[in-house]
Amino acid sequence: MPSSRGVTVWFTGLPSSGKSTVAQKLARLLADRGVATEVFDGDQVRSHLSKGLGFTREDRDSNVERIGLVCGLLTRNGVVAIAACVSPYRAAREAVRERIGDFVEVYVATPLEACERRDPKGRYAAARRGDLARFTGIDDPYEAPDHPEVRLDCSVDPPELCAAQVLAFLERRGYVPPLAGTPSGGDDEDALRKRLEDLGYL
């Protein structure tokens, strides 16, 4: 089987949009192919790599830059680096894209109302009450990508299908080899669902 190529898959979207869930599902699909993968979850990164950073624009951009530096190193060494962080500012994301080159932006465009309903940590409610300042989507801006490579909506599609859509894109771009006997052309949603059912993911 041909080997995979290094690439950074950057999930961006509002808090609780489903970024981390889809990123983990994608990592599982890649691991099943034997693809070297690392996942960087925004909340976990802030506990370690970006410990001490706050939520000013400067600190948010520093967080994105740090994640991007690590993803770039992994990408250069043939790893599929998956980042799932809000990364609300377009310029910071574009700077990471420019630096890395092999970069796939995945916009998880789950609507704000759906994100608030999904919110497991109650952060939106806290922000609405005024107990949590500088919360993206409430009193801090989110700049949606102009031209993401992949656009998802976790209020419409299950995370397994969203992950399969990203995987199909990576296959089409030649970053991940398709499964034996699977055409490398564009998969429509019905075909993706069928593949996931056959593999036991749905």
Image (cartoon, grey):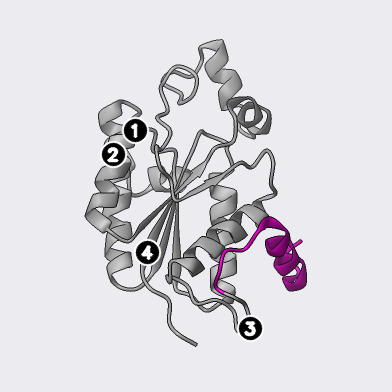
Mark closer to the chain start, 1 or 4: 4
The amino acid type of the residue labelled 1 equals Tyr
Image quadrant where residue 195 sits: bottom right
What residue is pinned by disc 2? 92
Measured Cα–Cα span from mark 1 to mark 4: 21 Å
Q: Residue furthest top?
A: 130
What residue is pinned by disc 4? 7
Find numbered disc 2 in the image and state the secondary structure of the residue it sits on.
helix
What residue is pinned by disc 1? 89
The residue at the point 76 percent across, 61 percent down is: 202
Q: From the viewer's perspective, is residue 24 above or below residue 130? A: below
For marks 3 and 2, give the one nearer the viewer: 3
The amino acid type of the residue labelled 3 equals Gly
Q: Position of residue 188 (x, y in %)?
A: 65, 59
The residue at the point 59 percent across, 79 percent down is: 179
Which region of the structure is painted magenta? 184-202
Measured Cα–Cα span from mark 1 to mark 3: 41 Å
Measured Cα–Cα span from mark 4 to mark 2: 18 Å
**Residue 41, which numbered label?**
none
Judging depth in this view, the residue of 73 and 12 nearest the camera is 12
Mark closer to the chain start, 3 or 2: 2
